[in-house]
Image (cartoon, rainbow, N blue to C red):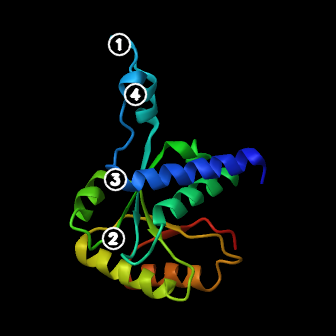
Amino acid sequence: MTNQELDQAAGLRAWAAASKSEAPHANTQRASESGPSGSRASASDRSREKTQNLLVIAHPYSTEVATHASEAILRYHQEGRQWVGDPNQWNIVVRSPLDEDFLEYAQRFGRWALWLDTDVQGFQRAYHTLKDLQHRCSKTPRMLLMHPPVQSRRGLVNNVQQIARDFFQIELLVLQRA
């Protein structure tokens, strides 16, 4: 990794940490950023137009999911996945299906991802999260399966993808190379 990539990753982690404590649409315009009035949009307005919202669904006991999801977005960008665009334009909101405001975010966000921890309890937490999701939502869209880098998708990643499909009728898109 180059120094520039490390700086980007550090910046993304700092942004994700700050996003945790702010409202979901934390890309607010400050007075110093406001542009001239009229038909021309300010830089902040143009930035807001490009913002990609992502609802990351995670088990309540999963930790630092916003940071890990931001790192995954950066990794996808570095792998050349063009749909990512600018990794800094992603507004990542992490919710559990058990959160009181989950349905509000589920209705507002068109892009969803399931967070998969790769520790010993990762499969169990993913299963329970999918089960809770099925109870809260009548229709669940196709979702991205996000996880830390793993050597192979065989095992944990494939197993979670299979239970999502077979038990919950949820299609999980896996970007991990085989």
At label 4, which amino acid type do we have? Asp
Q: Quarter of the image for the C terminus: give it.
A: bottom right
Label 2 vs 4, first from the N-terminus? 4
Which residue is pictured at 64% across the width and 68% down the height? 176
Q: Is the residue marked by circle 4 packed among few (<14), some (14-19), or many (20+) residues within 10 Å?
A: some
In front: 57, or 112? 57
Q: In whole angstroms, how far apart are the C-alphas of marks 2 and 4?
A: 30 Å
Residue 2 sits above or below residue 122 on the image:
above
| Badge nearest the viewer, 3 or 4 | 4
Label 2 vs 3, first from the N-terminus? 2
Image disc number at residue 109: 3
At label 3, which amino acid type do we have? Phe
Read off the residue under disc 4.
Answer: 45
At label 1, which amino acid type do we have? Ser
At label 2, which amino acid type do we have? Ser
Image disc number at residue 96: 2
Residue 106 sits above or below residue 174 on the image:
above
- Residue 88 can be seen in this image: yes
Read off the residue under disc 1.
Answer: 39
Which residue is pictured at 50% across the width and 42% down the height? 89
| Badge nearest the viewer, 4 or 1 | 4
